[in-house]
Image: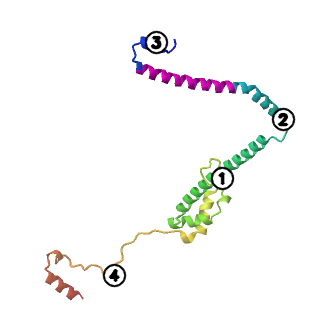
């Protein structure tokens, strides 16, 4: 069924609307024809492109210096290096975290941990097969205690030192009930 003026008049559409509909339909059909022509031109060129591709494949097979293969090998090497770098960084981060925990356990001051980690050679340390702990952690902790003994903090509790302890008046007077004059007089007596 074609979209014609006669068909649209039979549907009872106004003359102005018919013109608008025909105009929009014409634009759509024109665009589709242009797309069809472009695809037809591409389809006609396809056999030539296929012949050229076959020639290039034969030339690539004959030539062992394939540039794409070299590019592939280069990218593959870069990727392998990247993977190794990421794995090494993850291992170093794990060793750092575990060594930090050992140092804290040994009593090293929290303020000194970063300075100690900067000068510690983590490359010599090894992780266990699970990667969850350092090998010979007990020996490392003993080494931390001897090498970094100056940074180990000890905490002890003791009472406050007062050079002038408060006066014990055995409950005879209540300072809250003294007048200002009595308080000043008591202070003068004391000194």
Q: Are marks 1 and 2 in contact (CB under 8 Å)?
A: no
Marks 4 and 1, how far apart at CA? 58 Å
Q: Which residue occupies 45% across, 21% down? A: 19
Marks 1 and 3, how far apart at CA? 76 Å
Secondary element under disc 4, as helix, strand or loop, is: loop
Residue 88, labelled with which disc? 1
Which of 32 and 129 lies nearest the eye of the viewer? 32
How busy is the neighbourhood of tag 1: few (under 14 within 10 Å), some, or many (20 plus)? few
Residue 7, labelled with which disc? 3
Q: Nearer the viewer, mark 3 or mark 4?
A: 3
Q: Are marks 3 and 4 in contact (CB under 8 Å)?
A: no
Q: Nearer the viewer, mark 1 or mark 2?
A: 2
Q: Are marks 3 and 2 in contact (CB under 8 Å)?
A: no
Q: Which residue occupies 67% across, 24% down? A: 40
Residue 143, labelled with which disc? none
Task: Kindly identify which residue carries mark 2.
Answer: 59
């Amino acid at each position: 069924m074609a979209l014609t003026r006669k068909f649209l008049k039979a549907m009872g559409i106004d003359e102005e609307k018919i013109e608008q509909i025909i105009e929009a339909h014409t634009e759509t059909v024109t665009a589709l024809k242009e797309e069809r022509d472009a695809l037809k031109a591409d389809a006609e060129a396809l056999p030539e492109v296929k012949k050229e591709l076959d020639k290039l494949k034969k030339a690539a097979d004959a030539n062992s210096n394939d540039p794409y293969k070299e590019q592939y090998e280069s990218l593959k090497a870069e990727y392998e290096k990247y993977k190794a770098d990421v794995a090494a960084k993850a291992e170093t981060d794990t060793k750092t975290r575990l060594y930090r925990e050992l140092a804290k356990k040994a009593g090293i001051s929290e303020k000194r941990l970063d300075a100690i980690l900067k000068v510690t050679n983590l490359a010599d340390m090894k992780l266990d097969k699970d990667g969850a702990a350092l090998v010979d952690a007990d020996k490392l902790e003993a080494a931390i205690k001897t090498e970094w003994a100056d940074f180990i903090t000890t905490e002890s509790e003791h009472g406050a030192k007062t050079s002038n302890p408060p006066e014990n008046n055995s409950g005879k007077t209540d300072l809250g009930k003294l007048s200002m004059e009595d308080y000043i007089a008591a202070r003068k007596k004391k000194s």
